[in-house]
Amino acid sequence: MNEKKYFVSELIFNYLDYLENIKGLSSNTAISYKRDLVKLSKFLNASGVNDFESLTEEICSAWIADLFQNNVSARSIQRHISASKGFFNYLKKSGLISDSPFQLINSPKSPSYLPNILSPEEVSQLLNFKPKNSQEKRDLAIIELIYSSGLRVSEAVNSNLNDFEENKNFLRVIGKGSKTRLVPVGRYAQNAINDWMLERDKLSTKDNALFINLRGSRISTRSVQERIKNIALMQGLPPVNPHMLRHSFATHLLESSGDLRSIQELLGHSSLSTTQIYTRLDYQHLMKVYENSHPRAHKKNV
């Protein structure tokens, strides 16, 4: 193996290990960062860059231009740049380089998309099925919990039996950056979890995970995504993903309470600006109510 290639790959490995174990970055984000940094490493190798000190801002810009030419989305390019900036800052702090070539590189603005949500009626439609077996009882408990408590799918699958407090009224959740928060668990979610626990007790497992598969192992994020999508189709809805349930939780709560700060705490957002996207969704909802209800909202055709 080329010594330089090995050196770069080892540094990337060390950086990702630092992010996961010291900074508490999620494993999914770490995997994405690794993929992005490997792309950068291959581009530099093809461009004849022999060492980090000879890497210039112009070469970094050329890499970003190459991503654009390959139809990589603006949001994905933002992540590429974020991964690269963090990596070179890490190298600088480690004394391996004197300056970061990404220091003055700006991320492109991505189009502002509002998250897809379900209406309360669609949520009821999704949950209005009678579980026929242990798998479906588990699936119902997962969906109820995600919607009831506004969880990320990773937070749901990483929940353990001993994370509940006060007779399942609250769940202790470890979110992004290893930050712990306490979220309330609604009555419907509690009932669904209790039904699932009766089935779980019949399975042979030593795993402390709240949600397990039929082999007794912690259920994967991918499995939950696939199960929820299939249940939505079975219930006559378009495909639904777990994050739509989290968005729906926040939007429905904001519509009824208007308390953005509390929703920020429940979602585990470090910044209120992240939560403010739901005010735009709420505004859209109010506009629909206005347009459908106010007698002078629209001009009538003559």
Image (spheres, helix red, strand yellow):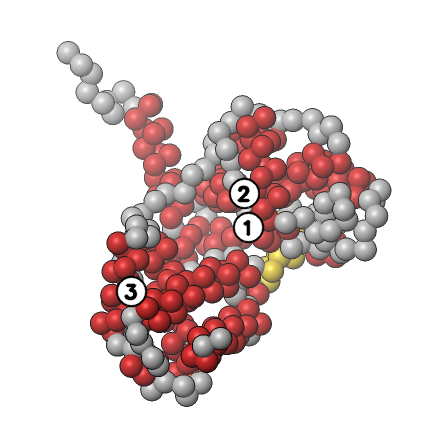
Residue 101 is drawn in which quadrant? bottom left
Tell whether 2 sits left or right of 71. right
The residue singled out by tag 1 in the image is: 152
The amino acid type found where label 1 is placed reads Arg
Q: Secondary structure at mark 3?
A: helix
Q: Is residue 47 above or below residue 238?
A: below
Who's the residue at 39% across and 63% down the image? 39
Badge 3 density bin: few <14, some 14–19, many ≥20, Cα 10 Å: some
Which image quarter holds the C terminus? top left
Where does residue 125 sit, x and y in percent of width and height?
A: 56, 26
Who's the residue at 59% across and 26% down the image? 234
The mark found on residue 242 in the picture is 2
Q: CA distance from mark 3 to mark 2?
A: 34 Å
Mark 3 and mark 2 lie on one chain; the one further toward the N terminus is 3
The amino acid type found where label 2 is placed reads Pro
The residue singled out by tag 3 in the image is: 63
Where does residue 283 sit, x and y in percent of width and height?
A: 34, 39
Who's the residue at 75% across and 40% down the image? 196
